[in-house]
Amino acid sequence: MSPVGHAGADSGRPGVGPVGRAGADSGPPGAGPVVLDGGDRRCVLLLIELRKLTTTVPPGTEIHLIATDPAAPLDLPAWCHLTGHVYLGPVQDRPRPTYGVRVTSGAAPTDPDRPWRPSQDHSGMGGSSGTRAAIGK
């Protein structure tokens, strides 16, 4: 079973796949949003997958995260604020709860296993030990 799904393939299976909708500011020309189907996973696991995905797509890419966890509408904007990615809010007219995120260049790195924490390595990303201390690191 492939984790890649296409527009309209809202099968309930977790995975990542392109959606056939292009936008002027949504990544490479002709590219539509990338869908990350989190299924019924908890938000902490979704953030780990979202963090990984944001490192594999070009800046400007729009990601649509399907997430049924009730914490998603709170955790996603907070994570985007932490990293510098743009939270686009709920995506309308979707059969399951879907949230939009736009990937930005120069986003603040986070810990691969705990993406709600800034990375220990802030080389060139504007982080400081004061930032880590302020959030309880």
Image: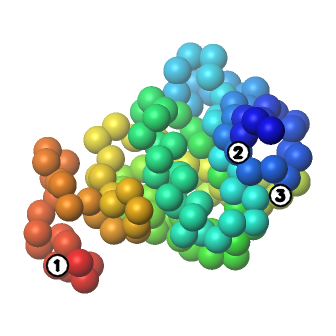
Q: Position of residue 3 (x, y in %)?
A: 72, 40
Residue linked to disc 3: 96
Callout 3 touching callout 2 (CB < 8 Å): no
Q: Is residue 25 visible?
A: no
The quadrant in which the N terminus is found is: top right
Disc 2 vs disc 1: which is toward the camera?
A: 2
Residue linked to disc 2: 15
Residue 133, label in figure: 1
Q: Is residue 7 visible?
A: yes
Q: Nearer the viewer, residue 84 or 117?
A: 117
Q: Nearer the viewer, residue 22 or 42?
A: 42
Give the crowd class for mark 2: few <14, some 14-19, many >=20 residues within 10 Å.
some
Q: Secondary structure at mark 1?
A: helix
Residue 68 lies in quadrant: bottom right
Which kind of residue does numbered mark 1 sit on?
Ala
Q: Secondary structure at mark 2?
A: strand
* Image point (57%, 38%), residue name: 62
Picture mark count: 3
